[in-house]
Amino acid sequence: MERILIVEDEKRVADLLKAGLEEAGYSTFVAYDGAMGLRLFRSNKVDLVISDIVLPGLDGFGLCREIRAIDRNIPILMLTALGSTDDKLDGFDSGADDYMVKPFDFRELSARIKVLMRRVNHKEERCDRLTYADIVIDLDKHKVSRAGIDIRLTPKEFALLVFMVENAEKVISRIDIAEKVWNTHFDTGTNFIDVYINYLRKKIDRDFDTKLIHTKPGIGFILAVQP
């Protein structure tokens, strides 16, 4: 039975999540603040974390960073009333894998949990290293280098680069990126994908003569030596 840690300070919401997830066949732990959530994470085997952002004491962003320092691969889904692009970027920068805004449909939450669980279960099927041109990605150590120079990426920048390298020399749309990297449908009212592409460009391309990340206007993006 897969175990889910719920970190939610509103008891009514926490109880609803607990009841729904246990009915779906999961085992759950519940914490009502970030510090308690971190203690439960450290003392129990957890397969996935669902955390609110606005929490007493240690907030969801801080909790996410603490958990990421312990386990790079544990799926983390942020569930919150904060729905702006900046809030989402902060969540992803903290290490979250997915982001849902309250109020939410439990069927969608359940579907996203299954996607995150499946991704972890299939991780060991991948090789431990990816390369394209002079980019080298160590999947186990979450390290990236280009032309032998180490490049520091946030967790979501890393996931985006992995997806682009796995699909090198193919045009990938914003919808592709949203569904494969963020496990969500692309919201045309936000520009967080373009923001992350720009973040990645600055780190991967800015200091190198050969640019690898290219925009295909009206279509999407491509990682290629020649666009």
Image (cartoon, rainbow, N blue to C red):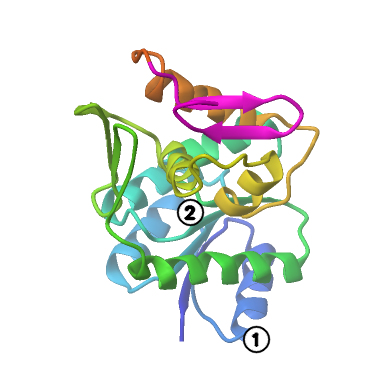
Q: Which quadrant holds residue 95?
A: top left
Pick whichever of labels 2 and 1 is earlier in the sequence: 1
Classify 10 Å Cα crowding around label 1: few (below 14), some (14-19), many (20 and above). Answer: few
Give yes or no for residue 211 being in the magenta stretch: yes
Depth check: give the residue in front, 8 or 207.
207
- The quadrant the C terminus occupies is top right
Q: Quadrant of residue 37?
A: bottom left
Please say whether residue 146 is one of the residues in the magenta stretch.
no
Q: Tell me the number on the disc at residue 33.
A: 2
Horizontal arrangement in the rendering, residue 150 relative to residue 157 (left or right): left
Q: Amino acid at mark 2?
A: Asp
Residues in magenta?
210-227
Which of the numbered marks, if any, corresponds to residue 196? none
* Residue 222 position in % (x across, y down): 56, 34
**At which x and y percent is residue 137?**
30, 43
Q: Residues within 10 Å of mark 2 (few under 14, many from 20)?
A: many
Q: Is residue 155 above or below residue 48?
A: above
- Mark 2–mark 1 Cα distance, whole angstroms, equals 24 Å
> Horizontally, is 173 left or right of 144 in the view?
right
**Which residue is label 1 attached to?**
23
The residue sitting at the front extreme is 226
Amino acid type of the residue that numbered disc 1 sits on in the rendered structure? Glu
**Does residue 105 show up?**
yes
Q: Residue at x 29, y 32 (%)?
A: 134
Residue at x-position 19% and y-position 28%: 148
Looking at the picture, does residue 185 appear above or below residue 173?
below
User: Where is 48 relative to 205, above or below?
Assistant: below
- Which residue shows up at 54% across the image and 82% down it? 26
SS under mark 1: helix
